[in-house]
Image: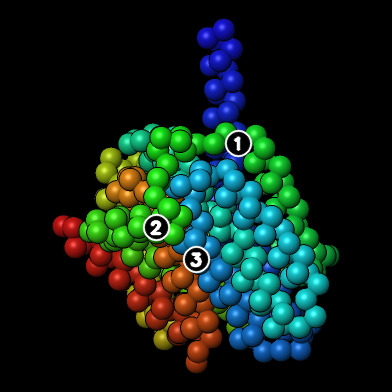
Amino acid sequence: MDSESNQIGKRYFLFLIIFLGALSAFGPFITDFYLPTLPSMTSVFNTSESMVQLGLTTSLVGIAIGQVFFGPISDKYGRKHIMIMSLILFVAATLGCIWSPTIEVFNVFRFLQGLGGSGSIVMSRSVATDCYRGRELAKILAIVGAINGVAPVVAPVTGGLVSRSIGWQGIFWILFAIGVVLLGMCSLFRESLKMEDRATCPVWKTAGGFLRILRIPDFRRYVLIYSFAYGALFAYISSASFIVQEHFGYSELQFSVTFAVNATGIGIGSGLAMRFRKMENAALFSTGGMTTFAIMLLAMGFMVDSFLVYEGLTFLMLFCLGFIFPSVSALGMEAGRSAAGAASALLGAGGFIFGGLVSPLVGIGDLILSTNLLLVACSLAALLLCLRRR
């Protein structure tokens, strides 16, 4: 009997890893899956690059707001019901994106799509914190963090591979199918937040969890480090398709290959983060490396116009960036354990808000210069925050 129970436990643990990984990757797929089609969507909707990029921003804002809403509510009512509710909203909003007649309507549904997808994203960290502590939590969040770091780059790669044959609407049909699959997986998920651990205050007071954990200096610092790291990531993501395809003249497929290479760099960095005995050291290594290579990118932009130089330095910067997602996620969730839903919401919302703010800024003036300046600013800010503890 014990052996059978142990086997069931192992199977559920494997399911939980897969489920949490899928939830973690959901946000980046919402925002980034259609990135290779951005240039072509300007013709489809007969609009400007800025209006098309606004769809990226509105989805990021929706994800950020949704996490702030769903996170603390899940601390009171549990994770499963909130997850199901948010996924239903996502599926409905995705259909709205597919059938949008104008870019303005599309951008509204992108906001709702982000809002719906946010519930799943915030649960990926909250559920892990409900179930594990200490080193075990760090290991689980390393896996989730690795996926969270790689997914923003893998999503456009996959989109680039299929966009030619199915178009931008086909990509959104795939997102619709992913939402339906995750809804089905919810039926196998066991509620992770015990009744005795739930918030007992009225619904409108659940936001008090934000105030409680924001009083923790280390938690505030980890949220800002995570947010600036995400800002750097989205500065790269939102500009890369235009730099690679329009500035350097490569095809959608070649752009996808470039993204695949960079995804490998982020994945390797995320996997190596657990080799540090202290997660604080992994975060310091990450931000120091990011800053170094971002400054080199900015300097080389004035000296040579070479794709190989651009790609080489970008790869090294993203490799360093990979260390930050598992390390800072684990540190932040451990610091905010007393209100895990609110803590996860603030970490995730901070990242997506910064990403949403940075994304449209890369289009101001010279694309390469503005992107590199943003990379330096975000990386340096994260590094200085890490050094404050020293």
What residue would you read off at disc 3?
Answer: 64
Q: Position of residue 188 (x, y in %)?
A: 65, 34
Q: Nearer the viewer, mark 3 or mark 2?
A: 2
- Report, in whole angstroms, how far the alpha carbon at label 3 lies from the one at label 1: 24 Å
**Earlier along the polypeptide chain: callout 3 or callout 1?**
3
Q: Position of residue 280 (x, y in %)?
A: 27, 50
Please indicate, yes or no, whether residue 318 appears anywhere in the rendered image.
Answer: no
The amino acid type found where label 1 is placed reads: Phe
From this viewpoint, which residue is outermost toward the bottom? 365
Decide: is 177 above or below 96.
above
What residue would you read off at disc 2?
Answer: 205
Residue occupying image coordinates x 71% and y 73%: 37
From this viewpoint, which residue is outermost toward the front? 202
Residue occupying image coordinates x 49% and y 61%: 69
Relative to 162, 336 lies left or right: left
- In the rendered image, which quarter is residue 165 located in? bottom right
What residue would you read off at disc 1?
Answer: 189
**Earlier along the polypeptide chain: callout 3 or callout 2?**
3
Secondary structure beneath dot 3 equals helix
- Report, in whole angstroms, how far the alpha carbon at label 3 lies from the one at label 2: 20 Å
Please indicate, yes or no, whether residue 138 appears anywhere in the rendered image.
Answer: yes
